[in-house]
Amino acid sequence: MNEPFIADDQTMARVAELMRMFNDAVGNNAMEDATARGISSAAGLHDVKQLLVADGDKIKALMDRPWKMLAAVALRAAQNGDYVLAGRIFGFTYHWETQIAPQLTREDRAEVLLFNSPPAIEAEIATVALGSLQQLPGDQAILSNATGSLTAGVLTRAAAIVLVDAPEKGVPVDDVVMATAKSVLGRT
């Protein structure tokens, strides 16, 4: 269960669908929860009972699996030139970590089956997003709904912030990637 996640065509299509669902869910807690459950389910985590019967190492592997799946899909999307999907996955991850996860109760987590993104996987997704989003015009909407939009430029800066802050979380960042992130933020 701790093996790398391979993003096959079916997983790519399902995650793209879930990212569209997330785009439409902003402000709708029930839809955000359904998106999170869909992500966990697509990664093989269907029921809280899976966590209750697992041992310590397997629990962590199960909890990390949805994030590994998102990282694998983001990487394959970037390799395929689908920079918007890679950006949406980062946008979801960033929104989850900054806006949703901090407010979840234990009961909420048991229901949605999506926990905090491990810092190393968050940095991996941010690295892919940084390169992908820079391929798009800065004003291109990546996530957009009635409440507004997050553009490639805004998400590029957010990815750069995640990467610049990663070493504080014990996550090493490639020197070239760090230099790019700092450049995006106007730091040297």
Image (cartoon, rainbow, N blue to C red):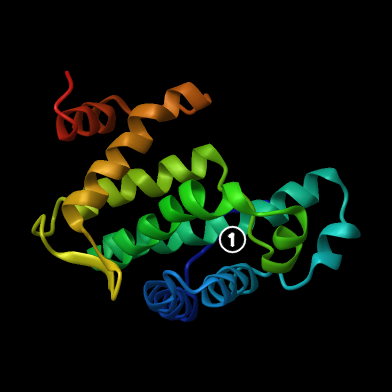
Q: Which residue is nearer to you in this view: 9 or 60?
A: 60
Which quadrant of the structure image shows residue 80?
bottom left
Where residue 44 sits: x, y (%)?
A: 67, 70
Where residue 32 sits: x, y (%)?
A: 52, 71
Q: Residue at x 32, y 49 (%)?
A: 128
Q: How many marks?
A: 1
Q: Residue at x 37, y 55 (%)?
A: 90
Which quadrant of the structure image shows residue 145?
bottom left
Horizontal placement of 42 versus 96: left or right? Answer: right
Taking 124 as reference, is 49 above or below it? below
Q: Residues within 10 Å of mark 1 (few under 14, many from 20)?
A: many
Taking 23 as reference, is 133 above or below it? above
Taking 116 as reference, is 39 above or below it? below
What amino acid is labelled 1 in the image?
Pro
Q: Which residue is nearer to you in this view: 116 or 122?
A: 116
Horizontal placement of 79 versus 27: left or right? Answer: left
User: Which quadrant is the C terminus positioned in?
Assistant: top left
**SS at circle 1:** helix
Where residue 107 sits: x, y (%)?
A: 77, 60
Horizontal placement of 1 versus 12: left or right? Answer: right
Where residue 101 sits: x, y (%)?
A: 58, 51
Q: Residue at x 59, y 60 (%)?
A: 66
User: Which quadrant is the N terminus positioned in?
Assistant: bottom right
**Which residue does the numbered mark 1 point to in the structure image?**
66
In the image as oriented, which residue stretches furthest toward the right?
A: 53
In the image as oriented, which residue stretches furthest toward the top?
A: 188
